[in-house]
Image (cartoon, rainbow, N blue to C red):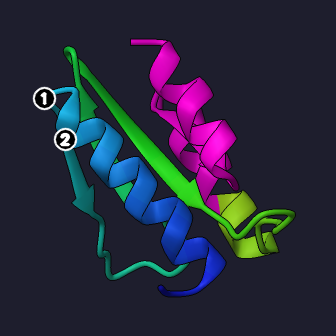
Amino acid sequence: MGTPENRVEQHLRRRVELAGGLCLKFTSSRSGVPDRIVILDGHVIFVELKAPGGKTRPLQDVRISELRAAGARVDVLSSRTEVDAFMAGF
């Protein structure tokens, strides 16, 4: 079934795709960038996924701050409930 983080990631992907959006795996030459880019309803959102109760690492916090300072939306989700709340905003 996968790790707890993978289950959260799969739930996000399914929910976004069912809503007609894209949930793209984000790879970068820079360490610490968010896991996914969600494109839905005219919005582009970077999403960092964690296992339930998981916390971002210091380098991830730096990257998230950089993205937000540049005007990007970045969400950190660590449970299926948080994914559902994220999706309720669309």
- 50 lies above or below 79: below
User: Is 14 colored magenta in this rendering?
Assistant: no
Q: Position of residue 70 (x, y in %)?
A: 48, 34
> Are discs 2 and 1 less than 8 Å apart at CB?
yes
The quarter of the image holding the C terminus is top left
The spot of residue 69 in percent (x, y) is 59, 34
Rendered position, 28 above or below 66: below
Direction from residue 10 to residue 76 in the image, left or right: right
* Residue plotted at (29% across, 75% down): 27
Instruction: Tell whether 60 sits left or right of 36.
Output: right
Question: Which residue is pictured at 49% across the width and 66% down the height?
Answer: 33
Where residue 68 sits, quadrant-wise, is top right
Crowding at mark 1 (Cα within 10 Å: few <14, some 14-19, many 20+) = few
Pick whichever, 89 or 66, lies toward us: 89
Residue extent of the magenta highlight: 63-90
> Residue 23, how many percent across, how many down?
25, 50
Q: How many marks?
A: 2
> The residue under label 2 is which amino acid type?
Glu
Query: Does 76 lie within the magenta span?
Result: yes
Q: Secondary structure at mark 1?
A: loop
Disc assigned to residue 17: 2
At horizontal 65% and vertical 48% (from top left) the residue drawn is 76
Q: Which residue is mark 1?
A: 20
Q: Please, what is the three-letter code of the amino acid marked with disc 1?
A: Gly
Could you tell me which residue is drawn at 61 percent across and 48 percent down? 80
